[in-house]
Image (spheres, rainbow, N blue to C red):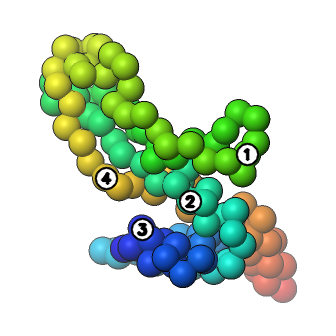
Amino acid sequence: IYLLCCRSRMGIGRSIRPILSVGMNFYVRVFVEVNSHGPSVKNLSCSIGTVYQSVRCPSYHVVPNGQCSERNIHVIQPTRAPMAGMEKCGEAGGPFKTAGPIWLGPLHDGSVIEEAIGRFGEFDGR
């Protein structure tokens, strides 16, 4: 569902950045920040990818949908997948199954987590 929200926002020139993710019982809640910054919309393709997992062993490879140019971080190039030599698993020789899309970016903003823990500590100390 998070990826669906990302893609729907991309269509109107906005991006979504996770601030805090909480897993409880049978659901996950993600608190997000919505941005209208153009380069961050293009950079989302680097945070979404595909998983290639061997059918004969637990090994897997994660390939992002885009990659940043080595010269300019704001230039996004498409990823070439599957990569050369990935037709079969290098460990067990089995073919790969694919899964995705999957979110590859961070699920939390570290500064928000630290602030919350600090505030909780102040509250707990009273």
Label 2 packing within 10 angstroms: few (<14), some (14-19), many (20+): many
Q: Nearer the viewer, residue 28 or 2?
A: 2
Q: Which residue is mark 2?
A: 44
Q: Which residue is mark 4?
A: 100
Q: Type of residue at label 4?
A: Gly
Q: Type of residue at label 3?
A: Leu
* Cα gap from disc 4 to disc 2, whole angstroms: 15 Å
Q: Which residue is mark 3?
A: 3
Q: Type of residue at label 1?
A: Ile
* Cα gap from disc 2 to disc 1, whole angstroms: 12 Å
Label 3 packing within 10 angstroms: few (<14), some (14-19), many (20+): few
Q: Which residue is mark 1?
A: 73
Q: Secondary structure at mark 2?
A: helix
Q: Secondary structure at mark 3?
A: helix
Point out the frontmost of discs 4 and 1: 1
Q: Earlier in the sequence, mark 2 or mark 3?
A: 3
* Cα gap from disc 1 to disc 3, whole angstroms: 22 Å
Q: Earlier in the sequence, mark 2 or mark 1?
A: 2
Location of the N terminus by quadrant is: bottom left
Residue 5 left/right relative to 13:
left
Q: Nearer the viewer, residue 77 or 5?
A: 77
Q: Nearer the viewer, residue 30 or 69?
A: 69
* Cα gap from disc 3 to disc 4, whole angstroms: 10 Å
Residue 71 left/right relative to 5:
right
